[in-house]
């Protein structure tokens, strides 16, 4: 039995559009950006994760960086397979004597199609997965923040990731109704790039926009504890010369307003389709925010004002999904909603 355990190891993967996290032996052992750098001449993987992100938008013609996931699903099958394989190698950097076969649980967006589901499964199997199980992200997030999903009580989870915002009403170990929209962290980044171009006539890249989002990103134009203004460098579109400007959180709140409004609409739509008994549970318990988007300043307050419901931001929202995926991995036979 010990030999069998050695040859088959278990991992839980949060295969996100922005970041990939892997749990092995109850610990988060990989937390890297979902990006891979490939040599175009040889097709060989040069770097993954943080190292590849440092190369992003700085490559020459023989090198390209690929983000294999777009809008929460696999957009480049080969790059996704290479990325998963290389990320798994990061679990044990020393070359093991035997390459173990992997038992995996991977989380997926709730509104994923059968074709997109198949792409995730095939990529995982090609990367060494012997047994591959799938779990919906809102369900994993609910488990990760400590909700007993098997209880006959309604809970509303809003998981704002990199590619998608998944909104689900969960009860009795199942998703009763859900909404999934392709407006999330990547859309926020694109909004910031567009705003800086229009308002300041400066062209910035994805990485700079991401820094703006982290440092001065806000859902409200007025905050109780505002962050300091943020200095940004980019290319002046009039002169072509690099230039530095300063942006404020109020400006970024205006830039993100349209996308956040779309998330609000999706939440209201999900609430409209909620059965009345579950709606009364949600009225008492409120909404739970998870994912990187939950860290946006003032978002909980804005959603609370819109819905007139209490809004709770999960502790460590970035890792809520992978934590839940890890718990599901340890209780595979307990959870009927795991898709084998």
Image (cartoon, rainbow, N blue to C red):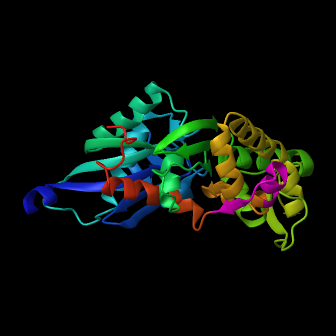
Q: Is residue 305 magenta?
A: yes
- Residue closer to the observer: 134 or 190: 134
Looking at the rendering, the stretch of residues picked out in magenta corresponds to 301-313
User: Disc count in the image?
Assistant: 0
- Residue 329 to residue 42: above or below: below
Q: Is residue 163 above or below residue 29?
A: above
Which quarter of the figure has residue 318? bottom right
Q: Residue at x 61, y 56 (%)?
A: 290
Residue 228, relative to residue 11: is it above or below?
below
Q: Quadrant of the C terminus?
A: top left
Q: Is residue 45 above or below residue 339?
A: below
Q: Can the viewer see residue 196? A: no
Q: Is residue 299 left or right of residue 138?
A: right
Residue name at image x 42 percent, y 54 percent: 325
Instruction: List x then y, in percent, for residue 202.
Output: 84, 51
Residue at x 71% of width, y 40% of height: 271
Q: Residue at x 41, y 65 (%)?
A: 28
Q: Which residue is at the front of the view, 239 or 92?
A: 92
Q: Nearer the viewer, residue 202 or 268?
A: 268
Residue 231 relative to residue 47: left or right: right
Nearer the observer, 193 or 330:
330
> Does the magenta-highlighted stretch encompass residue 170?
no
Query: For the N terminus, which image quadrant?
Result: bottom left
Residue 205, x across and y down, in percent: 70, 50
| Residue 211 position within the rendered picture, expressed as x and y whole percent measured from the top left | 70, 61
Specify the quadrant of the image occupied by residue 224: bottom right
Task: Let me know if residue 54 appears in the view.
Answer: yes
Q: Among all residues in the image, which is located at the extreme top?
A: 115
Q: Position of residue 267 (x, y in %)?
A: 72, 42
């Amino acid at each position: 039995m010990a030999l069998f355990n050695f040859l088959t190891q278990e991992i839980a993967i949060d295969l996100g559009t922005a970041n990939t996290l892997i749990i092995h032996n109850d610990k988060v052992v990989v937390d890297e950006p979902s990006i891979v750098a490939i040599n175009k001449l040889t097709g060989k993987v040069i770097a993954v994760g943080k190292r590849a992100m440092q190369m992003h938008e700085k490559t020459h013609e023989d090198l390209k960086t690929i983000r294999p996931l777009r809008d929460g699903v696999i957009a480049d099958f080969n790059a996704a397979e290479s990325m998963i394989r290389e990320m798994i190698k990061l679990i044990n950097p020393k070359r093991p004597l035997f390459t173990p076969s992997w038992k995996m649980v991977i989380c997926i967006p709730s509104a994923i199609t059968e074709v997109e589901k198949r792409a995730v499964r095939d990529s995982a199997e090609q990367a060494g997965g012997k047994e591959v199980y799938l779990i919906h992200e809102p369900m994993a997030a609910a488990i990760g923040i400590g909700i007993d999903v098997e209880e006959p009580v309604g809970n509303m989870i809003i998981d704002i990731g990199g590619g998608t915002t998944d909104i689900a009403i969960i009860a009795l170990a199942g998703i009763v109704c859900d909404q999934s929209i392709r407006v999330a962290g990547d859309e926020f980044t694109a909004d910031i790039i567009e705003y800086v171009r229009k308002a300041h006539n400066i062209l910035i890249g994805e990485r700079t926009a991401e820094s703006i989002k982290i440092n001065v990103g806000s859902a409200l134009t007025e905050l109780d504890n505002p962050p300091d203004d943020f200095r940004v460098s980019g290319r002046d579109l009039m002169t072509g010369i690099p230039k530095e400007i300063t942006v404020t959180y109020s400006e970024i709140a205006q830039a993100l307003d349209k996308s956040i409004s779309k998330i609000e609409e999706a939440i209201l739509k999900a609430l409209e389709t909620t059965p009345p008994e579950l709606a009364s549970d949600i009225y008492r318990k409120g909404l739970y925010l998870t994912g990187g988007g939950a860290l946006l300043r003032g978002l909980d307050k804005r959603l609370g004002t819109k819905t007139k419901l209490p809004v709770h931001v999960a502790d460590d929202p970035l890792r809520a999904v992978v934590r839940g995926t890890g718990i599901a991995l340890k209780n595979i036979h307990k959870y009927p909603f795991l898709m084998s």
